[in-house]
Image: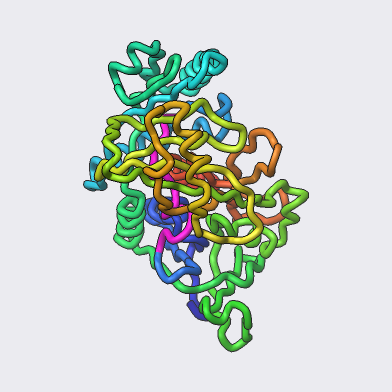
Amino acid sequence: MGGGTGVDVVVIGAGIVGLASAAVLAGAGRSVLIIERHEDIAREVTSRNSEVIHAGIYYPEGSLKATLCTRGRELLYAWCRERGVAHRKLGKIIVAGGPEEVAALDDLKARAEANGVPGMQLLDAAALRRLEPALGGHAALLSPETGIVDAHAFALSLLASAESHGATLLANHEVVGLVPTTAGWRVDAVPASDAEATAEASIESVECEAVVNAAGLQSDRLAALAGLDVDACGYRLHPCKGDYFSLAPGSGIALSHLVYPVPARAGLGIHATLDLGGRIRFGPDTEYVDHLDYSVDPGKSARFAEAVRRYLPSVQTQWLEPDYSGIRPKLAGPGDGFRDFVVAEESERGLPGLVSCIGIESPGLTAALAIAHRVVSLL
C-alpha cells in the first residue's frame, strides 16, 4: 500500500466470499488487493462451519440464497474436480422424527424442485432404514446432490487462483477508513496490532475504483465506515453462535449420508455431518450472542443428545464430546422471518463502486463462486 499506489478493486475480507470474488475479478483482468485483518485467510466463518455443499433445498424460490446456492453448487463441484480440492458428494437425508413433521417433507421437496434441485426422493420408514440402518423416523427426504468439501483447501485454491492472475493479499491489516473520491475510493488500513490506536503515522492508504465489502462478521461495521446507515439499510448483523459436538469413536454408529432434522426456525437444526475422514459431528445449535466467544459448553451435551435422538435413537449423552463452534453473520434477529443475502452495488445509496456482501451465512460456502460472479457483474 502507500499513498501513491492504486488498484482496480480492493476486496475486504479473505474468507471464502472475499477470496472467490478476488479470484473471479483477477481472472477477468482486474487488478485486485485483498485486505484481511487476521494473520491468515479463512479464520472466522469459513473455518467454523459444517463444510457442507448444499443442494438448494430450503430457500424461497427466486431468492438470492436459492439462485446463488444452486448455481454455486455446480460451480463448486466443477472447481473441486478441476483443481483436486477434496470433496465428496455423499447425499443428505432429512428425517421426519414424528408424524407431525411428515407433511414438511413434501413442502421441502416442492421448494427444492422449484429451485432446480434434481433427484429429490421421498422415503418411507422402511426405505429410510434400508439406506441408513441406524436412523429412526417416520419418513425422510433424500437429496443426492448434497456433499462435503475441505473448506480450507477450497479457500487456498481460490487464493492461488487469484494470485496467479496478479492479485495481492495484505494480511494482518484492519480497514479503518473507506472514503469516496472523484475516481472511486480510498481505503485506509493499519496493522491489526495498531487498530485500536489508529495512529496517523501507521495508516496506509490505497486508491481504487471499487471496493468489495466481504468482511463477514465485520461487514456491517465496514458498511457504516463507508457511510451507509446500516439500520436504515437493514444491514445490521445479529451474530448467532452454533456449537458442535463430535461422536466418540467407540459408539459403534456408522453413517454414509449427512442427516438433518426437519429445519428449525433460526437454522437447519442440529444435524449429523461427516468430515472427509468419516468422523461424525452434530451441530450447530443457535444462540444469539453479543461478542465473539468460540468456547463450547460441555453442559449442552444432554440437550444435543436429546435433539439427535429424534433421528438417531441409539445416541447416548456420554458419547458426545465438545468439538468447535462458529458464529453466523445473520441479518435475521431472534424471531425474525427469512432474510436473504445482500449482494448489492450501492450507487442508489450514493456510493458508486461499493459492493456490499452482507449476511452471508449458510449457504455462503456453497454459493461463494456464484456470489463472486454476481459481484463481477455488478462492477
Position above or below: 141 against 68: above
Residue reaching furthest to the bottom: 201
Position above or below: 6 against 317: below
Left or right: 228 with respect to 340? right
Measuring from the top left, give residue 356's x and y in whole percent.
60, 51
Which stretch did the figure color magenta?
41-55
Residue 114 visible to an observer of this rendering = no
Residue located at (30% from left, 22% from top): 133
Residue 47 is inside the magenta segment: yes
Left or right: 244 with respect to 291? left
Measuring from the top left, give residue 270's x and y in whole percent.
49, 37
| Image-quadrant location for residue 31 | bottom left
| Image-quadrant location for residue 53 | top left
| Image-quadrant location for residue 353 | bottom right
Which sits in the foreground, 246 or 147? 246
Residue located at (50% from left, 69% from top): 37
Measuring from the top left, give residue 260's x and y in whole percent.
44, 30
Left or right: 300 with respect to 249? right
Residue located at (38% from left, 54% from top): 23
Measuring from the top left, give residue 180's x and y in whole percent.
66, 65
Which sits in the foreground, 3 or 317? 317
Q: What is the magenta segment's predominant secondary structure?
A: loop
Position above or below: 83 against 204: above
